[in-house]
Image (cartoon, grey):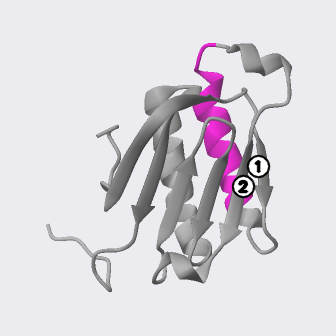
């Protein structure tokens, strides 16, 4: 669904879409400046290719990055895209970065008109690896 890799544990679709301007405002909690800058660069590259929208001429919706340990274990995140704003909460900075990657993938596939969604994800295993 939406071509997200890895596929999040939970995706709940809601009605509506969020129109993003070419350079959306990203607000980050203290300590998440690196994740904000990373997401800003990713969105700039994804949204520069998207056709303009009516919201380009006015300040657009904010994307808010927050730390919230209640989201789950390390690297877990919750991403909520509503008709007016985006809230990305991570259990830690790594979780915020993982959620930012998901938001970037959505912007690549959907352009500036993002579907309203609630996504929750966390690592499925305590380690990362690969097999050749």
Image: magenta residue range:
35-51
* Mark 1 or mark 2, whichever is nearer to me: 2
The question of residue 46 being in magenta is answered with yes
Which residue bears the numbered disc 1? 26
The residues tagged by marks 1 and 2 sit, at their Cα atoms, a distance apart of: 6 Å
Q: Earlier in the sequence, mark 1 or mark 2?
A: 1
Tell me the SS state at disc 1. strand
Front residue of 17/109: it is: 17
Tell me the SS state at disc 2. strand
Which residue bears the numbered disc 2? 64
Q: Position of residue 42 (x, y in %)?
A: 61, 43
Specify whether residue 114 is in view: no
Q: Residue at x 39, y 42 (%)?
A: 13
Q: Residue at x 32, y 86 (%)?
A: 126
Q: Position of residue 65 (x, y in %)?
A: 69, 61
Q: Position of residue 35 (x, y in %)?
A: 67, 62
| Crowd band around label 1 with a 10 angstrom C-alpha radius: few (<14), some (14–19), many (20+) | some
Q: Is residue 33 left or right of residue 103?
A: right
Q: Position of residue 86 (x, y in %)?
A: 64, 47
Up/down of 101 relative to 97, above or below: above
Q: Is residue 123 left or right of residue 14?
A: left
């Amino acid at each position: 669904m939406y071509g997200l890799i890895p596929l999040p544990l939970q995706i709940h679709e809601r009605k509506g879409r969020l129109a993003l301007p070419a350079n959306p405002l990203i607000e980050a909690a203290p300590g998440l400046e690196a994740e904000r800058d990373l997401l800003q660069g990713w969105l700039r590259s994804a949204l520069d290719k998207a056709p303009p929208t009516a919201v380009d001429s006015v300040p657009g919706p904010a994307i808010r990055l927050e730390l919230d340990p209640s989201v789950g274990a390390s690297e877990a995140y919750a991403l909520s895209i509503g008709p007016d704003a985006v809230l990305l909460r991570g259990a830690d900075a790594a979780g915020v970065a993982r959620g930012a990657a998901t938001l970037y993938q959505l912007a690549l596939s959907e352009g500036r008109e993002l579907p309203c969604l609630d996504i929750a994800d966390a690592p499925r295993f305590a380690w990362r690896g690969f097999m050749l």
